[in-house]
Image: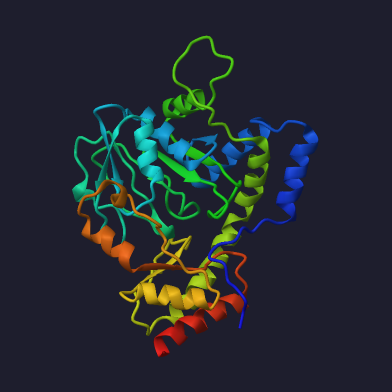
Amino acid sequence: MMRSVPHSAVDVGEAEIQAAERVLRSGRLAQGPEVAAFEDECAAFVGRAHAVAVKSGTAALHLALAALGAKEDRCVAIPAYACASLMTAVRLCRAVPVLCDVSEDYTLDAAAIPRDAAAAVPVHLFGASTPIPTEMPVVEDIAQSIGGDTGRHGQAAVVSFYATKLLTTGEGGMLLTDDEGLAEYARDRRDYDNREDFIERHNYKMTDLQAAIGREQLRRLPGFIATRAAIAERYHEAFADLPVGRPSDGTGHVYFRYVISSDERDALEAFLNARGIEAKRPVYRPAHHYTGGTFPNAERAHRTCLSLPIYPALVDEAVTYVIDSMLAFWRA
């Protein structure tokens, strides 16, 4: 029996180490040429004209929403089944977060979005793509789907480069857009130093050290996604006859998470954890648990969903162990 299988793990290799060393030896650690190069490469990769690197995905969303007019007395639609960072970004704009239920496949329910919303934030959850509303400005959250068919459909897209995301800079984020004015707004507000005027700006800059690591991770991202797809295919085949909901294997899914659903979620989670497999709720505490309200599909997802280990550093032996343990639970 394997000793442990973490839920997530960072895949950092010699190229990232050399990139970090290059920056350390340069003496230029703060925002500089590495950030500019990373922005250009991210924009080209996603297919947008402009990219603005910042310190987190939340910072990117804050700047994107503010540029689109989210402010006091305006509302921003976000899914109820999502983490607290979306509400945080909306509140930083002093706007009102309006929670909307999700559909049965966890995508934002477009019918629930107020038509007077300043913006909507559809989240491409777990690596799948979600439909894009067309009645108001949209900021796509591609933190879990960069590398798939996402990020090119709204006024802007935002991505997080947290340690366990699809690619990492440790911490960090990026705003992507085709709107030059929106990009300039974000560039202006991410840095408050050496200015002649005063408006509310922030220390939202990414460092060259982070960007150098991110550039190497971005080059490896297609390989990361191919590995995730191969693991997902093994899970698909192994779990085909189990009484669990499985993720869609549709085109464009990048399998940031492999999320199953079962009314026996709690017992299954405890069983896998006891065998050293770190399976966990994919959204620890959904937004509606902070605000209240009735969101039946979001609540069902919170009650039944379980995320299994899937990441590029997951070795074949560990994948086999996860599969065997899942089958053992249903045979018990």
Which residue shows up at 49% across the image and 51% down it? 146
Which residue shows up at 55% across the image and 36% down it? 53
Q: Which of 285 and 178 lies nearest the eye of the viewer?
A: 285
Examine the rendering and report whether any part of residue 17 can be seen: yes
Residue most extreme to the bottom: 331
Residue most extreme to the right: 25
Question: How many circles with numbers are drawn on the protein?
Answer: 0
Which residue shows up at 48% across the image and 71% down it? 232
Q: Position of residue 192 (x, y in %)?
A: 53, 20
Location of residue 119 by image quarter: top left
Examine the rendering and report whether any part of residue 132 can be seen: no
**Is residue 294 positioned above or below 62 on the image?**
below
Q: Quadrant of the N terminus?
A: bottom right
Which residue shows up at 56% across the image and 80% down it? 321
**Is residue 259 positioned above or below 140 on the image?**
below
**Is residue 238 positioned above or below 62 on the image?**
below
Q: Position of residue 82 (x, y in %)?
A: 36, 52
Q: Which of 232 and 266 lies nearest the eye of the viewer?
A: 266
**Left or right: residue 31 compared with residue 52:** right
**Left or right: residue 25 compared with residue 94:** right
Image coloring type: rainbow
Location of residue 315 by image quarter: bottom right
Q: Quadrant of the C terminus?
A: bottom left
Q: Position of residue 63 (x, y in %)?
A: 43, 31
Q: Which of 56 and 45 lies nearest the eye of the viewer?
A: 56
**Left or right: residue 52 compared with residue 68:** right
**Left or right: residue 165 compared with residue 73:** right
Q: Position of residue 213 (x, y in %)?
A: 66, 46
